Amino acid sequence: MPKGTYYFTKGFMWGTATAAPQVEGLNDLNTWSAWEKETGRIINNHQSGLACDWWSGRWREDFDRAQASGQNAHRLSIEWSRIQPAPDRWDENALDRYREMLIGLQNRKMTPMVTLHHFSEPLWVAEMGGWENEAIIDLFATFVKKSVTALMPYCHLWVTINEPNVFAFNAYIDGVFPPGKKDIKAALSVLQHMVLAHARAYHVIHELQPEAKVGTAINYRGFKPASWLPADHWMAKLHHHLFNDLFVQALHTGEFKVLTKKQALPQAAGTQDFLGLNYYTCDHVRFNPLTPGQFFAHRFFPGDALLSESEFISHDPQGLIDCVKWGHQFGVPMMITENGVDDSEDLLRPRYILEHLHALWKAINDNYPVEGYFHWTLVDNFEWERGWTQRFGLWELDPETQVRVRRPSADMYAEICRLNGISSAITGKYAPEALATLFP
Ligand code: GAL
């Protein structure tokens, strides 16, 4: 078997990604805290509770873990409901804590990337209609101005909104995120408000910090026709258009285009300095006239797919190459802002990481400009409506005792970060089953 190393570019960012509602714990001011309390919303009625206990300061030990394992960057989110608990009240202590976290990253020589909205809003915003009410655009801009003013000495990489496409779909079509609606019209209007809120935030941040790099993190999902039938091909295209294209195209062209209906949003044109890509998996798509609420399709993983523990993800590294190629049309540098797999036993994760990084290396070697990779995630966390049933961490967490135990993937990822590459030695040690693909 050949030996060798696939090196990444000099200065490549290696990190993990986290989100405030999933790691901080003890928040009763946001939409998710209220949602969790409603029976039946979260699998097994799980509660986030302390989560990873970051709000009490346990971020310190987790940042130590990240640093000690060679990571040079970290993506985290700040929580609007803590910073602005009421429309007329700013909590300077909350901003202080975030300031401390960012200084904590700087002290550990890790570049921070801050997400300003990651799936949660203050309850007072939700009471006003949340993202359905266009008043949120001004409110969000005010929150961004306040937060960026406070935090910009320590950060220049900003993600305005995490996965607007997943948010609109899960909260307004599937109904599994708050406010739990099933209303396609509302979903499209929410997405449009998110385009405008992003554009406002983009300009607000650049006025404050001209050297800032501002982007979004879109969830790219591959959609493959289930057969040769033209109807399956059309449906795959439709899903790609609505889920992947719609939001990012609007930021690129200033046009919000749903099928043939166009709405000009010129203020959104050219408002990304980089494109964040969250890539996990691909779907097969079959036309189904009986499911208008799911855009006339049945989405599924094929019978021979290699699935994650909870069957949430099908292992498809080629999809990451497709994702990067797709992202390149927007003409800005890209970052992989999330990629990972639920796997409490760490059986698939080493192979998943290596094969995705190999795919990423191939894309970069073909000159697609990707500047960093943030693995999802550092320590097991509260996975939204799936509660604690999914374990995405490099470190295992017992949420009761807060004890962390490193998984083999944590050691493997550390070797990768330190080497700035993936080698046959690392592959042979952690995922020999991937040798044939990576080092044929
Ligand atoms: C993404 C989301 C993350 C994380 C991940 C794994 O959609 O941005 O917060 O939960 O999925 O489920």
Image (cartoon, rainbow, N blue to C red):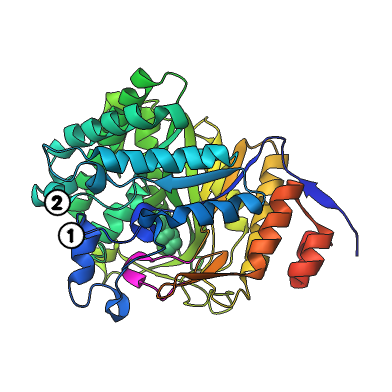
- Mark 1, residue position: 179
Residue 189 spot, x, y in % from top left: 19, 45
Q: Residue furthest left?
A: 128
- Quarter that holds the N terminus: bottom right
Residue 135 vs residue 337: left or right? left
- Mark 2, residue position: 126
Residue 57 vs residue 204: left or right? right
Residue 120 spot, x, y in % from top left: 27, 52
Depicted 338 relative to depicted 399: above or below: above
Q: Amino acid at mark 2?
A: Ala
Q: Main secondary structure of the magenta part?
A: loop
Q: Are marks 2 and 1 in contact (CB under 8 Å)?
A: yes
| Ligand 1 occupies quarter | bottom left
Q: Residue at x 43, y 27 (%)?
A: 153
Numbered disc 2: secondary structure = helix
Q: Tell me, yes or no, whether the highlighted magenta stretch contains residue 381.
A: yes
Depicted 291 relative to depicted 138: above or below: below
Q: Tell me, yes or no, whether the highlighted magenta stretch contains residue 279.
A: no
Q: Which residues are magenta?
A: 380-390
Q: Residue at x 30, y 24 (%)?
A: 204
Residue 304 spot, x, y in % from top left: 59, 78
Number of disc labels: 2
Q: Residue at x 57, y 74 (%)?
A: 305
Q: Amino acid at mark 1?
A: Pro
Mark 1 neighbour density, 10 Å: few (under 14) some (14–19) many (20 or more) = some
Image quadrant where residue 439 sits: bottom right
> Which of pointers 2 and 1 lies earlier in the amino acid sequence?
2
Q: Nearer the viewer, residue 299 or 390?
A: 390
Mark 2 neighbour density, 10 Å: few (under 14) some (14–19) many (20 or more) = some
